[in-house]
Every structure is written in structure tokens, then in C-alpha cells.
Amino acid sequence: MKKYIATIFSAVFLLYVTGCTSDFDEINTNPNTLTSDQLDASMAGPSFANAQYKGLGNASWSISGDDYGTYGLATMLHSMLFVHYFSCGSTGWQTERNGVNDGWRSRGWLRFYTLAVPSLRNAYTAAEGDEEALAVLDIWKVFMYHRFTDSWGPIAYSAAGQGGASVAYDLQEDMYDDFFALLENANETLSGLNGTVGIFKDYDAIYGGDTELWRKFANSMRLRLALRISDIDPSRAQEIAEAAVAAGVMESNDDCAYFAVTSDTYNNFVDIAKYWGFYMSADMESILKGYNDPRMEIWYGTNGEGEYIGQPNGGGTTRDWSTSVLSQSNQETTFGDNTGHDIEVMMAAESYFNRAECALKGWNMSGTAKDLYEEGVRLSLSQWGVSDASAIDTYLAGTTTAVEPTLAVEYTKVGGSATPPVDVPVSWGATEAEQLKQIAVQKYLALFPESWETWADLRRSDADILYPLLYTEDADGNYGVMRRLTYVPTEYSTNEAAVNEAVSSLSGGDKGSVRVWWDVN
Amino acid sequence: MTGQSVAAWQLSFNPDYAGPSTYSMTPQPDNAMSLFETGYNWAKTVTASMGNEKIQGYFSYTNTEAKGIVKGNELDRHNLNIRLTSDLSDKLHLDSKANFISQTIENPLNTGESSVGEAVYTMIRSMPFEQIEQYQYTDASGLLQYNWPNPTSVGGLGGNPYWYALNRPYTEVRNRFIGFASLKYDLTKDLSLMVRSGIDQASNKAVSKQYASLSVLGNDYGSYSETSGQTMELNSDFLLSYNKDFGDFRLGLNVGGNSLYQKRSSLSAGGQLSRRNFFALSNLQTSTPTSSFYEKKMNSLYAFGQLGYKEYLYLDVTTRNDWSSTLPADNRSYFYPSVGLTAVLSDMFDIRSDFLTFLKARGSYAQVSNDTDPYRLSNELLYYRFNGGVVLSSTVKNNENLKPEISASTEFGVDARFFGNKIGLDFTYFKTNTSNQIFTINVPEVSGYSTEYVNGGEIENKGIELTFNADVLHRADFSWDLTANFAKYKTTVLSIMEGRDELSITTGYERVAQTIVKEGGEYGDLYIRGFARNDDGQIIVNEITGLPETTSGFDVYAGNFNPDWTAGLTNRFNYKNFTLSFLVDFRIGGEVISYTQARMAGAGVSDITLNGRTDGFVVDGVNAITDEATGAVSYVTNTTSVLAEDYWTKVASRDPASAEDFVFDATNIRLRELVLGYSLPKSVLGNGPFAGVNFSVVGRNLLFFMNNAKYFDPEQGVGVGNLQGIESFNIPATREFGFNVKLDF
């Protein structure tokens, strides 16, 4: 017995003293996750896939850590309301009245920087050495960040997503320099290939890795961004815009960038518009009815009485109408199923409107402003399924202007005017001022429902095409379009020096009424 | 709500509706409370012990059935316990135990949003209870539907609480086995070796069903999920003990080691259904099972000893070294000691008297180190199979340099007894400093991470505890004992980490309050959004709307969730075969924030919203007037009135703009327990089958002598750990009455 006990004792003792930690590293390795040293070329596509979906502000339950609410809070309750594509049924959502909600805005910021940006970084790491893949990533990087800087002004860019207790912000003008350089370089790298980026082929939900389509996307982005800086730096804008058009921008609807949805990466807009109580705006009713625009029935559904009625944006906490009279998104067909409608990223029609506006400035856009404008309208209508050429011609010849929306009296009740701001018809006008406004209205319609670009473009163009809000909660009493988003509270609490420096570069401080760098005139 | 006749809302959609076609709109003061039923807890226990000099056994079995105050909330538990001790030889002793517990819980009560509580508290006050009871109906196409006004509109406030309680069935089954076997061998008279091994293993299964309802669930198919998990803990240790007396000295020396292995894994799948209300995994529209895993090992070696002198002076020393798999190689081995001295002063100085019966003083210093959870050392990538594959980074930045946490505590105590043990007093003072704590801090999100694991923080917790007991009266047939205890402690945040002087230790997405630790502040400080105030502390009110301005962040201090002090007082009376005891608890100080009260105010269903419903009321505050020329701001008394609806929907929305109206003092004094017992006298039992028969009636949580939170019990369901002091849609506190019968054979 003694011997037996002694054996147990020495065995146990040996266990503790020798080699007791040899399996610890293995035990402390999570079998359910990968580590960063496993980011090889086979991971480039899966990383890019997430950077695309999250970079578009979308999310699904299929991936832990986010859900479609981010799109609802960050996009639908901000840019979508700012540009009056929709209004909301809830009377308590202050962002519809240019008010501020820290939580909603923060949600978009958080998911962009902690999900989209790291995925893009992972994709860069995994695609190392593949020049064409890196060029595509550069284009996507510009797309992701331009929305953010256009919304906020200075943001973390060159130092973003790399850890650190303090992360400096870049000035918007510096980011734009880099955007143009990246896009020009990508155009060169992808020129003449007419091929496919192999590692993205099965994962790129926008173009399946097609180099030529990405190249046109890059040039269309150059054109978009050149027009954006056309007030702050007209000569440079002209140079870049002309170079972009010469290099080749999107020209047909086959070039359009859609994110192809699946049941795991579905279209958040469809669900949020359906479930969160979003209604057609009075502005949309006014324009679409006035123009007899065939897109009205495609985009919106009727109320219970078979009518299309839009709601004035910025209603107060008590309202003289019921949401039951209002139109919602078209949940019967176009926006019925979250896997049934791909996400609009950038459409070919936009490039035509951008070229039309630049042509009005006298820049070389390979076409006249009128022709480019009309081609833009044609592409937009056909993009939404209006295929009858005579219907399109009729639309283009339209001489009617916007009409008073059903609830127009609400504007007069708060001391405003019921007269629709859109006083131009579809048919090409005689004066440059009229033509400029026509381009703005048609681009406003053609960008639907991608509201971030619409918001940036309305701020740049200052086109007077929307009714003012009924009520405002903006600190400076702004009833018009918000000029920017304010920085999120977590940046003040965790990255204070950087955000304060960014704020000091803004003329007017961290306010929603302050203009970003390119927003002059 | 003036008794006007309105059409019954079910008419338009419920084909089987047989009730009146109109009803009168009148207040239904009890419609919410009628939901609750009397719960019960019915426990049956049999115990037996048997044996002889060589072998002893113990057996017990308990069955508990319980039902809560909300329909569907039930529990059934079986607990079997067997213990066997035996002397295998003169020197070899066996001790073993097996404990098996099988438990099923149906529909545990949730708090917070989307709970039964939310539906009950925010309920429309005009809805007659008979209509609430019918929580479902079958529509014209034969589908089961949610019965509530606008049954297919998505979202919205509150809802039918019965649907919440009964049509989201959740079952949790847990089978747990705990057992150990220990052998002790006496090598010599003074030296023994113990070897022991134990296991604690459990398997769990949770099944959740949610019936199709656009309004409640957001989909018209239903949803289903299953989660199965296993947890296992293996614990093996040995201890070599040496005990010897040397004259006036007594020495005890022990050397031992322990190996702890923990493993947990779970597998879950769930989602929206395809065929309506058919609850099976095969019927999920899309199914990606997910698994979680946790594995950790810790080895320890330790030695401890006691040196005693003349039975009145004792020195205790312990040393321990742990090796943990959760820490990096350089830091995974860590050592911590303790030392303590105890003196029975009454014996040491021979000062016992009729007055002083016993006096003992003790003092100790101890260090304890802790490791962390697995997988916190290197950054992780998550991979998902769909769309050909998606990979992303975890938003938590792990830390390859983590060190063990250290806490060092000093304790002094005195135990004094007087008048032949009739009065006793025990006093303890303690101070614990914890440093190198492992926690996550928020990092700039632009860094790509939202949180990062760090070592940091120094927290000091000090306090006193006092226990007093007295035999107040002792007569042949009657006695009265009294025990009182008192505790007071304070936890101060000395530092957080370099470059950080505050840290939110809640998740960051709270709707009503956050727990924020600030350097120099106290642990448990609560912060809310509140009214914007001028330098004189007056509320700034918008002169046009009459609404108060509010702060944008959680930057208004609301109080601390810890009490200033707590105390308890137990009195026990014996008279012949009767016993009566009662316990009064005191909890003085501290704050609790009620999200329930905020949301009820926002919904306009609580009495604080009565004022100013039609004519408005004037918020007590000032209007800020800015001089256009100079920009100087001056303040004038606010005279603009505001309607109650506008005020409360702003202040008490889902994310309350100001929670100042919902901060309550948690001070309360309650009758925690009252027990009345009776034992049948021996004369009655006689030579019958029973050795003893005992009856008792127990009442718990019977009444408040004082409750400053007035609407709710400030101690119920207000969270644990870092998230305390926030009450959110708790089911009302209950009074419990119990009746115990104990039969000894």
C-alpha cells in the first residue's frame, strides 16, 4: 500500500513540476477563429466581400456583431431623411428635423471603422503583390472613405484601422489629393487588361473582379469627385474631369455598379423602408406627379385608397394627418423582398448628369450638355425598367413642372410657401440657370435611393429643389439641407486630441451647420 | 376616457369574436395587475443517514416544483445526493460524494425591453382585462394571429403581455453531476497524504420558440432556436500534511498541489422559420450553426502552515504559485503569499472575568492573484461560410502582454464575548487594493477596434463589519436572542490607467444610465443624461416650446448604486415548543434608476404625467436670452407652458433625454423574514413512529417600514456586477408565505 501511495504521489508531483505548461499555448488557441498570420491570398476575396457590404453601410444577422439596424440608424435616419427621399412616421425621430442623435450617428461611425475598415485592411494584406487586386482595393477604398469625409470633413484616413491609443485625422483636401492619385493610378494599372482579378472573381459582389468595369467605376468616381471640388478649385476640377471622361467613364447600364444581394447579405434598405415606418416625401410626390414620372409607381406604393401621397419632411411631434394616408416604398414589387433588389452603388446615369453639368461650364465632356442630360434621363428610366422608347421620349418632352403635394397646406400652416421649389420641366430649358436646375433635379431622381451621394451633391450644388422642413431642431435654425454630421461622443472620450485638432480646422467648429472643405459658394 | 362608446377593435379582424360590438371607454385601473397570479414553490425532501464504524452513508432527495406569478413560468428540479465515507483500513480513509441534479425551467422571466414587464407596465389603461386575456385568435385563413389593436403593424409600444408570456415559449433543461473521491492515507501518526479528484459536469439544452407575429416578432413565419452546451470542470489535488506538538508549540505543515481543467462548449442554431409556426431545425429558412468553446487549465503548488503556542497564539503563513494557460508564457507563472496572526488575548493575559468571557484579536495580510479568460492574447479573425466565404476581424484588440491581476488585503478583527457568552461582539476592518486588473477599455474606434484588453486600474475597497449578539432573556420556558449586524464599505477608484481618468464599465449602449468609473470617484457611480443647467443650477428651458434643454451625453451624476451602509436585526423568541423569529433589514443610501418609470411616463400611463395634459404646465427653469450685439447670455424665469405629452415624450423617450425624474433613493427598511415554528412535544409523540415533528410558517419580504423608491422594490432585479442600479421592467416584487413540515423518523 505504501508503495502504491508513493507512486501516486510522485506521479502527481511530477505532473506539476515538470512540463506542466507544455500544452498551454495549444489550450489557449481558439479553435473557432483564425489568426492574422493566416491572411493569405485565399483570404483576399472573403475580406473584400465584407469590406464591400459593410462599406455600403449594410449588415445582416449572418455575421455576428452587426445587423441591419446600422443601415436604419446611420443611413435611413440621416442622409435618407436629409435629402427627402423619405420621411418618417415616428414623430420622435429628431434627425428628420435636423436634430442630433448621438447613438444613431455613432452606430454608423463604429461599424465603418471597426468592421469595414479592418476588412479592407485585411484584404490589402491578403492581396499583397497582386497589383490588379490592389488597384481594385484602392478604388473601393476611395469609395468607402469619400462618403465619410463628405459627411464629416476631416476624418481618420491614413492612420485608420491600425490600432493605437490616439489616431490622427486627415484634412479633407489631403484625402482628396490621395483619392485622385489612387484613382488615376488604378485606371493606369487596369487599362487594357479586359480581364478578371482572379482572387476576387467569386467574392466581388459588384463586378465579379472585372477589371474593365472597375476601371470605368474608377473614372466615374474621378468625375464625381472632380465635380465636387469644382467650387473650391475649378481649374483642377476641370483637368481631372476631362481626364476621367477621356479615360472612359460608365456609359451604359451594363456598367452600373450594383452589389448583388444574397440571403446572407441582403438589401437593408428594403427591410428598413418596410418595417421602420418610412413614407414617401412630399417633395417626391410633388416632382414625380408633376413630371408624370413613371418611376413613382416603381419606387412607391399606394395608400389604402390607391393614392400616392407624400409627407412633408420635418413634421412636429403632433401632426394634423395620419400616416395611414401616406405612401410607403413599393413593397409589392420593386422593394418587396430584401433579396430581390440589388444595392445601388453607382449608376451610369450619374456620370451623364455630371458630364452635362461640366459641359455647361464649357469643359470638354465629349458631348453637349443637352445630349448628355437626355442620355442620363434615358439610362435612369431604363435602369428602373421603363423600356418603352416612346414613353421615354414623351417624358423627355415633358413641359409640366412639379405640382403642390397633397399635404402642401402644411407648409403654409407654419408660415411657408406651398409653391413647389422645382419650377423647371423635364424638357431641356433655354437658360443656363434653368438647365443647371434640370440637371440637379434629374440627378436627384437618378441617384435614388443612394442618399449619401445625393446629400453631398445637394450641398455642393446648393440646388433649390426641396421644400424646407416644417420644423427644425438644428441649433442654428437651419430648415434646409444639413451641411455635415458632428463628430461622435466616443471620439471625444477616446481620441480627444485628434478630434479637437480636426475641429479646429473647421471654420465654425463641430456643428451640423458648418461646411466641409469643398462646400463653398 | 369618459365612458364614450367605441367599436370593439377585434370586430374588423377576428372572425370568432363573440364579445360585444362596442365597449365603453373607461379607466381599467386593475387591467395590468390582473395578469399576475399567485405563485408557489413546493419542495419535498427525504434524507437518511446510516452506517457503522467502518462505513457511513448519507442520502437525500429533494423535488422542487415552482410556479411564478406570470403564467408559463415554471420550474421542476430533482436533486439526489449520496455520500459515502469509509475507513478502508486503519490508515486508509475514503470519502466520496455523488450529486445529481436535473432541472427544467420553463419561461424564465426576463426584464428589460421586449419583456412581459414592458407589455404590462406600458399597457393601455382603457383595455378591459377580458380582452387582454384573449391573446390570440384564428383568422379567416386559419392562421393563428396576435390579438391586439393593429395586429400586423410592426413594432410599437408595449403589447399583449399574455402573448409575450405564452407565445414565446422557452425551455431550459440542465442535468448536472458533481462528484469526488478522496483517499487519505496516514503515513505515520503525524504525517498524512490526501489525494482527491472531482468532476463537475453539466449538459444544458435551451429551446426557444417564437410564434409568428409581425407586431411582436417582426416576421410572419415564427422563429426557432436550439442551444446545446456542455460544461466540465476537473479538479485534482493532493495534500501532504504534518501535524505535531512540541511542548507548548503545535505545528501544522501542509504541501499540496492542484490541477484545474475547465472546458465549455456549445452549439446553437436558429432563425426564422419557413413553414409558419412549425418549430424544427429542419424548417429554418437559413441555418448556420454556431459553436463556442472555452478551455482553460491552471496548475498550482502551495504550502501553508500554522504554528500555535499554548492554544492562544497562532501564526498562519501560506504561499502559492499558479500556472495559468490564459496568460502569456512570460507571465503565466505567478506567486502570492499571506500571513496572519491570531491571539486569544483573554487567555494570553489571563484576564477572563465575570464581565469578560473571551477576547480574541486577529490581523492578516494576504495577496491573491488572478488570471483571465482564454483567448485574450492574440487578435482573432472570424470566418463565415456563406457567399463563398467572408472573413472579418474581431473588434476586440487582444493583448499579448497581459499580466495577472493582484489584490492585496489587510484585515484586523476583534471577537469579544461578555457575561459568560451572553453578549458577543465581532468587529472586522478590511482594506483591499486591487491592481493590474484585466478589463477592456474603449479605444478610438478609428483605430479599427472598439475595445482593447489592458492591465490597469487600482481600486481600494475598505470597510467595517460588526456583529452583535445577545441572549436578552433566558428562562425555563422562554428565551429571547438578538443578533444585529452592520456593514459599511466604500470602494474608491485610485487610478484607471495612464492617459485615462475615466472609463465606462457598462456596454456603452445603455438607454438610461451608465456606470462610469472616474479617477477619485467611487465604484458604482451612475451617470445619466439630464437637464441642461446654467451656472446657478437652474434648468434651461426653450422659451418657444417650453421644453427643457437636455445634455447630449451621460454626463450628469445621478448617484451611486452601492448603499451607504446596511444592517440587519434578527430577534428570536422561544416559548415552550413555539419559536418566533423575525429579521429586519436596513439598506440606507444609494440610488436606483427606473427605466420602467421613465417609459411609463413616456407612454403617459403613470400618475406623474397627469399634470398639464390639457392646459400644459410651466417647467421651473429659465430661458436663455442671447444679446445679439454682445453675445452675452442672460437668464429670465421661464413662463412658457408645455403640454404634458410634449414634455414627457421628450424627456422620457426610449432613450430618455433626461432621466433626472427617474432617479430614486434606494433607502429601504423591510421585514425580510418572519418564522413561527412549533414542535410537537415528546409527550405527544410518545412511542409513535416519529422522533420529531416540526411545523413552521415562514413569511418573506413581508412589508416595508420605509421605501423611498415608493413605486418598486429597489433591491429587486437591479443587476449584478458592473451593471447595477438600473431597474428595467421588473415583474413586481412578491411577498412569500411558506409552510414547512419536518418529520424525523
Image (cartoon, grey):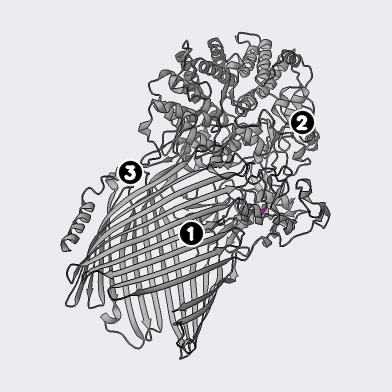
| Residue B25 lies in the magenta-colored region | no
The answer to whether one can see residue A421 in this image is no
Locate the N terminus of chain A by quadrant.
Answer: bottom left
Which chain's residue wears label 1?
Answer: B
The type of residue carrying mark 3 is Asn
Tell which of B583 and B682 is nearer to you: B682
Residue B158 falls inside the magenta stretch? yes
> Which contiguous range is marked in magenta?
B147-160
Query: Label 1: which residue?
Result: B103
- Chain letter of the residue beneath label 3 in the structure image: B
Q: Position of residue A441 (x, y in %)?
A: 70, 22
B439 lies above or below A1:
above
Q: Residues within 10 Å of mark 2 (few under 14, many from 20)?
A: many
Q: Are marks 1 and 3 in contact (CB under 8 Å)?
A: no
Q: CA distance from mark 1 to mark 2?
A: 57 Å
| Residue carrying label 2 | A308
The residue to which callout 3 is attached is B401
Which is the main secondary structure of the residues drawn in magenta? loop
